[in-house]
Image: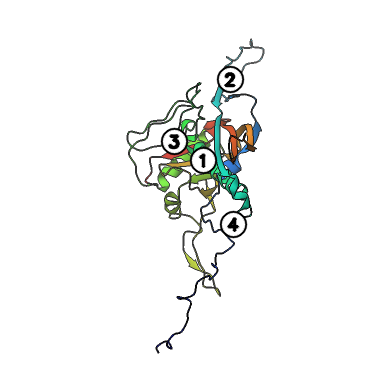
Amino acid sequence: MAQVGNTFDTYDSVGIREDLSDVIHNITPDETPFYSACKKTKAKSTLVEWQTDTLRSSAANAHIEGDETAFNAVTATTRLNNRTQIFKNAVVIPDTDEGVDKAGRKQEMAYQTLKIAREQKLDIEKALFANNAAAAGSSTAARELGGLGAWVKTNTNKGSGGADGAIGVARTDGTDRDFDQTQFDDVMQQIWTSGGNPDRVYLSPVNMNAALGFVGNNNQRSHVQAGDEKVVKSLDVYVTPWGTVEFVPSRECRGDDVYILQNDMWEVAVLRGTKNTEMAKTGDATKRQVVTELTLCAKNEASSGGVFDTNG
């Protein structure tokens, strides 16, 4: 049907108020599973140090009566360290903003400060997972912490051309291949042999899909629950002869890496906890910065391992 002549409709009207929702929808995830799971300790310097030790291999131990005692050779502990890294984000908002009526938030500064704090947590998680060597820094270069890739070296499975790094030194990436159960089982056995008790596996979403296909997984078969017709396919806990582990997908874990960790052997040493500070005014604007300074401590990396050079 046609519109009646001279109908004054909304297309002709001037002054219709906007219908702008008072809610800001943000779907960007901010989960940081590894950073959140790590125990937090207090750092007292930009160079954080700790010591590790290990038992010798077992040996035959039988002696005759009354023999002269021989004393064991004693080995020194290993002294390790990592550098704290400064994470900093800042925002500047003109003071005119104070008088503007905004949708979704009362104060722009409060909203933006909270947003950059959440973004900074993602930066920290990314740095902890990084295959990055520690850097001492200088007056012209930033200090950098050594990430997981620079620590996990004893128990590994890697692609062609891949090479383990030294303690605190980044590893060399090799040729990518698909992540599979053979690689996973190999590293689990290595960790167990070294004395570790792994309990968490951090991996990319693509590698998580590969893990869903592991043989022997009780959740391997997708099934429909009676009544609600819900299809279930999940892998939360995986039981192996070498230990029971939880698979935790992380968006910040490199696709090349699958980390199999004994979680209590990894700590984050915090020199400066996350702090929101107002900066000095230099004009008609307000400035705030969010700063965190911390590093990663590998209490004993032989407790953990990694499958590297995957197509994740």
**Location of residue 266 (image quadrant):** top right
Q: Tell me residue 260's x, y (percent).
A: 50, 41
> What residue appears at the point 56 percent right and 64 percent down from the top-left corner?
21
Viewer-side residue, 142 vs 57:
142
Check disc 4 and report the residue beneath it.
Answer: 102
Helix, strand, or loop for circle 1? Answer: helix
Q: Residues within 10 Å of mark 4 (few under 14, many from 20)?
A: few
Tell me the residue at 67%/12% (across/down): 66
Crowd class of label 2 (few under 14; some 14 to 19; many from 20; radius 10 Å): few
Depth order, front residue of 67/304: 304
Q: Nearer the viewer, mark 3 or mark 1?
A: 1
Give, as a three-letter code, the residue at label 4.
Answer: Lys
Name the residue carrying label 1.
Answer: 123
Say which residue label 3 marks.
Answer: 156
Earlier residue among tags 3 and 4: 4
Q: CA distance from mark 3 to mark 4?
A: 53 Å
